[in-house]
Amino acid sequence: MSTNDQVPKKVLIVPLDWGLGHATRDIPLIHELLNAGCEIVIAAEGKHAALLGAEFPQLTILPLPGYHIRYSQKGLFFGLKIVRQIPKIWRAVRFEQAWLRKTVAELGIDAVISDNRFGLYHPDIPCIFISHQLLIKTPFGGVTERLLQKINYRFINRYTACWVPDFAGEPNLSGILAHPKELPAHTEYLGCLSRFEPMPGVEKKYDLLALISGPEPQRTNLEELILAELREMPGIKALIVSGRPDQAARREVAPGISQVSHLNARDLNEAMLAADMVLCRSGYTTLMDLAKLNKKAILVPTPGQSEQEYLGKYLMQKGYFYSLPQHQFKLRKALEAVKTFPFTAFQHGHDMTAYKKVVRDFAETL
């Protein structure tokens, strides 16, 4: 955005309603756009709106329904249940298109950044699509994945550009997901996209920080599993963050074990630095946070979610994080196993603020 402009350019940010990761990874983008002098409007609902509203109380948040995907209780049927809801996703995309045309006309939106929502492209303004899943992993393998990739690219190529939150070369966090043989048109890699920062001098408080996240009912399944395990481990110092920004609760589960419904970005940043070990899903945004802070972690992929299962295996093979499936999870055994795991540092000289230049360059074009 030119410094001679008197009126700030208005950028609409819209995260996908799949867990909280899409909303949280948009936080550093919003900060950088605000630093560039842009006016930000957010569209979200429910806990995503609550999270972003808590981080940016000064910003307008428009109500926009999400895709409202329902998830299987059993991991075995996770992928099948998603496939059966494709018609519902398609209807949501058509609604997004009509909503965006109306919103651009009424509010004078100058640009859109869509975090993995397929229907937020407009012929008259720059529209960015953010995704780390250019290749969409499924339980059904190659043919299905190639078909979904074609559909994915068909939508992505309707946008002005595709921003990928990962590094273009090695090492990277997403493997083949964001590094397939063929890329969408106008693809640009952002590097690591994390709202967190290393902070020197943070005192160690916890043996374990458990971050509960992801879609229901699997979020609750993991929460109950971890609580049951921790109650059988006297002497451990642990903090459980339940991933419920729509609630405000804190309780002592047992001596030395606390549980909170949600932490804001700064408090969660400090909690991660204050923990010897992090236990979490292998959600991609969480992985970027771990890499940025150079933290050791035990990953428990969401059962049946092929992307998380792939990332867990890929990153364990690389030596970055320890991963195991939920049906094999025993906390005491996992904490014993990680004592001999290499935990190779990911960063290797990577610029963890590379995304800032991409965002600034984009703002300058508006």
Image (cartoon, rainbow, N blue to C red):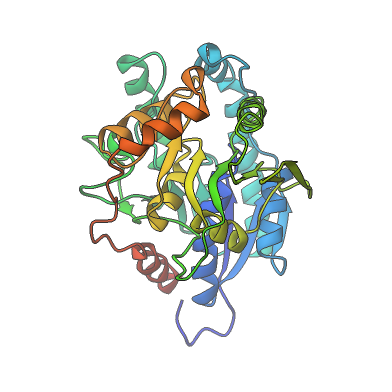
Q: Residue furthest front?
A: 235
| Residue 98 sits in quarter | top right
222 to 187, vertically: above or below: above
The residue positioned 38% from the left and 25% from the top of the image is: 137
Q: Is residue 7 left or right of residue 166?
A: right
Q: Nearer the viewer, residue 244 or 42?
A: 244
| Residue 298 sits in quarter | top left
The residue positioned 61% from the left and 17% from the top of the image is: 72
Q: Residue furthest bottom?
A: 4
- State the image coordinates of residue 252 (x, y, percent, origin top left): 75, 44
- State the image coordinates of residue 165 (x, y, percent, origin top left): 38, 50
| Residue 352 sits in quarter | bottom left
The residue positioned 50% from the left and 62% from the top of the image is: 28
Q: Nearer the viewer, residue 14 or 348?
A: 348
The residue positioned 60% from the left and 44% from the top of the image is: 20
- State the image coordinates of residue 143 (x, y, percent, origin top left): 32, 15
Tag count: 0
Residue 359 can be seen, yes or no:
yes
- State the image coordinates of residue 159 (x, y, percent, origin top left): 43, 48
Residue 45 can be seen, yes or no:
no
174 to 197, vertically: above or below: above
Q: Nearer the viewer, residue 236 or 174?
A: 236
50 to 81, vertically: above or below: below
